[in-house]
Image (cartoon, helix red, strand yellow):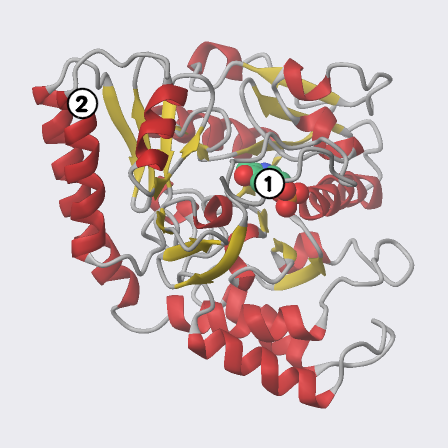
Amino acid sequence: MQNIKQKSPLMNTYARFPISVAKADGSYLTADDGTDYLDFTSGIAVCNLGHRPKLVQRAVEIQLQEYWHVSNLFQQDIQERAATSLITGTHLDQVFFCGSGAEANEAAIKLARKYWFDKGTLQKSEIVTFEQSFHGRTGGAMAATGQNKIKHGFAPLMPGFTHLPFNDKQAITNINPQVTAAVMLELIQGEGGVVPADQDWVNELVHYCRTHGILIIADEIQTGAGRTGSLYAFEQFNVKPEIVTAAKGIGSGFPAGACLASAEVAASFSPGTHGTTFGGHPAACAAVEATMGVIQEEGFLREVQDRFAIFRKQLEQLASSYRQVKQVRGSGAMIGIVVEEAAPYLQKLRNRQILALPAGPQVIRVLPPLTASAEELSTFVQVFEEILQEGEISHD
Ligand SMILES: *Cc1c(COP(=O)(O)O)cnc(C)c1O
């Protein structure tokens, strides 16, 4: 038995795995009893280059030798470089840095409302989001989230959010342009079960927003940083959102969040309108610049796409051979395997030293590092097939 504390000084906000971490390196995590696990959680889509990628470590170490904190009242080249690394190759122009995904969405919500306020259309303050979406745990981000279980017990919620069914073309016409500032969506819902948006639906939604003067906010907190095989998922969905939020993977495990926007929209933030003490932390920015630099390297994402296309095909073969596997969905290295009940599979994988995540009760969410080798990906497929061969999953 590992050294798991029964009574903890930590608040009980996470149902933690029975694994106490000692070390992590590349695609592997080592428990304090010496067990190595193939980590296909990547810290919930954070360690996209694996654990402790050398280039990122070096960049952070260099920054730590220079300075740690000076406040955002100073000009900091490392912030400018990190921002550039996030927008290079996109249609986006400027970045607001913060410390997490939820904060990035808070910034996006404020920015969208301020944009219409500045235009003199104060009534356009409503944000439309979608059922089963996840946008974070803070006040605005929680109100934006389309899952009741996230909000239960936390009333009163911030007003001004409407949830519509996801992938429902009919519902789009319910969006009232008179009062709607923005539509905010995950192009592939993560926590909601790795559910991709339908291209047809996205096309109609974008057309509606463009026709009626409604901003589009893409929450790319989970789908960004190369996770879906492109730098951001919006590239695959033929949409150019005015606002994009990123976090999780952008700093390889250093806490960084970012709200990216077009120049026109970004102009609504001026000194005194928004801010946070630790936003754009120099060490986190060094991690962001180094991480995004690797992901933006010529050929890096193409190679990820190829490697994960093979993995995807192998998983789909399992889906056609084993009736327990109902569907395989997602994109790139963000994969959902739909089964009757995810939890027993996750436990069986863990017993065989492989870590994956749930996304809702029926989805095994597989988030390998983008750098996982073909062999490591094959290991997952082999072990998962062995589990499937055991037949009906039982609770153990
Ligand atoms: C994780 C996540 C968030 C919240 O990010 P935090 O850093 O945990 O605040 C928001 N949106 C999506 C899509 C996420 O996956």
Amino acid type assigned to the residue bearing label 2 in the image: Leu
Which mark identifies residue 4? 1
Secondary structure category for the residue under label 1: loop
Q: Residues within 10 Å of mark 1 (few under 14, many from 20)?
A: few
Q: Which residue is drawn at 31% across and 61% down?
A: 371
> Looking at the image, which residue sits at the far right?
272
Please state, as top left, top right, bottom left or bottom right, where the C terminus lies in the image: top left
In the rendered image, the vertical position of residue 60 relative to residue 174, given as above or below:
below
Image coordinates of residue 151 in percent, x first then y, are 72, 19
Image coordinates of residue 203 in percent, x first then y, are 39, 30
Q: In this view, does 277 lie to the left or right of 330?
A: right
Q: Nearer the viewer, residue 77 or 325?
A: 325
Q: How crowded is mark 2: few (under 14 residues within 10 Å), some or many (20 or more)?
A: some
Q: Is residue 357 left or right of residue 218?
A: left
In the rendered image, the vertical position of residue 350 relative to residue 375, given as above or below:
above
Q: In this view, does 354 lie to the left or right of 132?
A: left
> Looking at the image, which residue sits at the far front?
1
Q: Is residue 126 left or right of residue 25?
A: right
Q: Does residue 213 appear in this view?
A: no
Q: Does residue 120 appear in this view?
A: yes
Q: Which of 387 and 255 is in front in this view?
A: 387
Which of the two discs, 2 and 1, labels the residue nearer the N terminus?
1
Secondary structure category for the residue under label 2: helix
Is label 2 or label 1 in front?
A: 1
Image coordinates of residue 161 in percent, x first then y, are 72, 22
In the rendered image, the vertical position of residue 387 relative to residue 253, given as above or below:
above
Residue indicated by mark 2:
388
Amino acid type assigned to the residue bearing label 1 in the image: Ile
Q: Distance between the residues labelled 2 and 1?
A: 30 Å
